[in-house]
Amino acid sequence: MLEKTIEINDINKITEIVGNSDKNLNILQKHYDVTILVRGSSLKIIGDNAEIASKALQIIAKMALNNEHISEQQIRNAVNLVSAGEENKLIELTDNICLTATGKVIKPKTLGQKQYIDAIAKNTIVLGIGPAGTGKTYLAVAMAVKAFRAKQVQKIILTRPAVEAGENLGFLPGDLQDKIDPYLRPLYDALLDMFGSEGFKRHMDRGTIEVAPLAYMRGRTLEDAFIILDEAQNSTNEQFKMFLTRLGNNSKMVITGDITQIDLPPSKKSGLLEATKILQDIDDLKFHRFSDKDVVRHKLVQDIINAYEKYHK
């Protein structure tokens, strides 16, 4: 039976590390089939997997000592880093992107997310493809806000196709804006988080933030702008090509989507899906693919994605 002991330099962080009612320790004990004992400022790990469990616990301790709140998501991140043999890359997850209106720090929570924001920083066009809950849209908005605040661009433009689960705009109640708003709600929510309601309204009134359906992009040249196309799997080939060719000088595009959730009718091909076959070899255009390990929502979301993938395989 192996034993490993970890010394915590700041005893005040012990509670954050172990969690309420030892919740965090219980997750690790169950995952690695070990026993973890708290002895003052020491954590003793006992069991055949004590060595690998101690690596995960050391990551969690470093996060706590860096004044981070240890959530179940943080524990999953630590476990994933260790299983990939990349525990030394924890430092990469400390890069801050921007602050929300309430002062919350936005930063990558997984290595996949870090690679995504690095790709956005280095390339003119980035296509972020992956399952729900991986932060594709939210991080893209954060990067747009960062560029906007740094005056690298003059405008933020967010768009998505008005196609959802076979519904049609004409069947929804209200005027055109009422019909459009439900499709754009996730984009509004992200911007409200970053700017606050007053700041968001002010920028909308000035035209420095624009949120509109994809169809509204036709015929335009988008210059000095950070442009995000969300739910791109629901754009047709024609719409996708139209959007890409709107790119103007000093602009950046981020395209996000999940090719496992295409809501187009069977007669229509997904522009995003086709793009994965057509655009692979273009310079300054980068594909980034998220995995289930990048899911930062509830653990069940990750389990559900894995279950569906296993079923379809």
Image: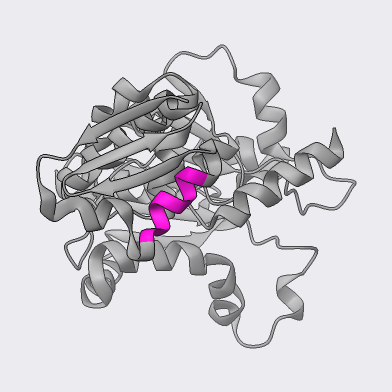
* Residue at x 74% of width, y 76% of height: 170
Q: Nearer the viewer, residue 221 or 69?
A: 69
Q: Nearer the viewer, residue 286 or 63?
A: 63
- Residue 84: x, y in percent? 48, 22
Q: Is residue 234 left or right of residue 154?
A: right
* Residue at x 27% of width, y 28% of height: 92
Colouring method of the image: one colour
- Residues shaded magenta: 22-29
**Count of numbered circles in the view:** 0
- Residue 191: x, y in percent? 34, 63
> Can residue 291 be seen in the rendering of this structure?
yes
Q: Quadrant of the C terminus?
A: top right
Q: Is residue 200 above or below residue 258?
A: below
- The residue most toward the front is 1
- Residue 152: x, y in percent? 19, 39
- Residue 32: x, y in percent? 52, 36
* Residue at x 23% of width, y 60% of height: 100
Location of residue 309 (image quadrant): top right
Location of residue 194 (image quadrant): bottom left
- The residue most toward the right is 267
> Can residue 247 be seen in the rendering of this structure?
no
Q: Main secondary structure of the magenta part?
A: helix
Location of residue 116 (image quadrant): top left
Q: Is residue 91 left or right of residue 86?
A: left
Q: Is residue 105 left or right of residue 230?
A: left
